Image (spheres, rainbow, N blue to C red):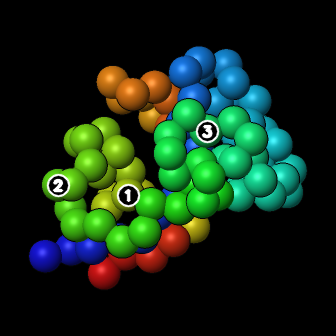
Amino acid sequence: MATACARHILVKHKELAEKLKQQLEKGADFGKLAKKHSTCPSGKKGGDLGEFRRGQMVKAFDDVVFKKEVLKIHGPVKTRFGFHLIQTIYRS
């Protein structure tokens, strides 16, 4: 079964997600932004979700992690939890 390791920043508003993505594209530190802004408990770990299997996350999140380019920052991706900026670290 496919596995991946990813990190994300979860926020309530799309506008904030877009603003944070612009900062990341200009070289801001992902971990620092996750610690400051993410509403997910993983924010305390710089957004690190560790390794997980396909199907463990909600579909929209899974689709990005398992289908989109690795190491690129994707999003904002809307789920029932809010808006995610997602970076897949590796996938196997």
> Which mark, by number, is residue 15?
none
In the image shown, does 36 or 3 lie closer to the viewer?
36
Q: What residue type is disc 2 on?
A: Gly
For the C terminus, the image quarter is: bottom left
Look at mark 2 in the image and give the residue it sits on.
Answer: 55
> Which of the marked residues, 1 or 3, is nearer the chain's N terminus?
3
Q: What residue type is disc 3 on?
A: Ser
Look at mark 3 in the image and give the residue it sits on.
Answer: 38
Look at mark 1 in the image and give the residue it sits on.
Answer: 65
Q: Position of residue 73 (x, y in %)?
A: 60, 53
Check disc 1: other Cα within 10 Å, few if <14, some if 14-19, many if 20+.
many
Indicate whether 12 appears above or below 77: above
Q: Position of residue 13 (x, y in %)?
A: 59, 18
Q: What residue type is disc 1 on?
A: Val
Indicate whether 54 appears above or below 85: below
Residue 23 lies in quadrant: top right
Please give the name of the residue rendered at 46% of the width and 34% of the height, measured from the top-left corner.
77
Residue 85 can be seen, yes or no: no
> Which of the marked residues, 3 or 2, is nearer the chain's N terminus?
3
Side (left or right) of 19 relative to 1: right
Which of the two marks, 1 or 3, is nearer to us in this view? 3
CA–CA distance in space, label 1 to label 3: 18 Å
Indicate whether 23 appears above or below 15: below
Residue 21 can be seen, yes or no: yes
Which of the two marks, 3 or 2, is nearer to us in this view? 3
Check disc 3: other Cα within 10 Å, few if <14, some if 14-19, many if 20+.
many
Q: Position of residue 9 (x, y in %)?
A: 58, 43
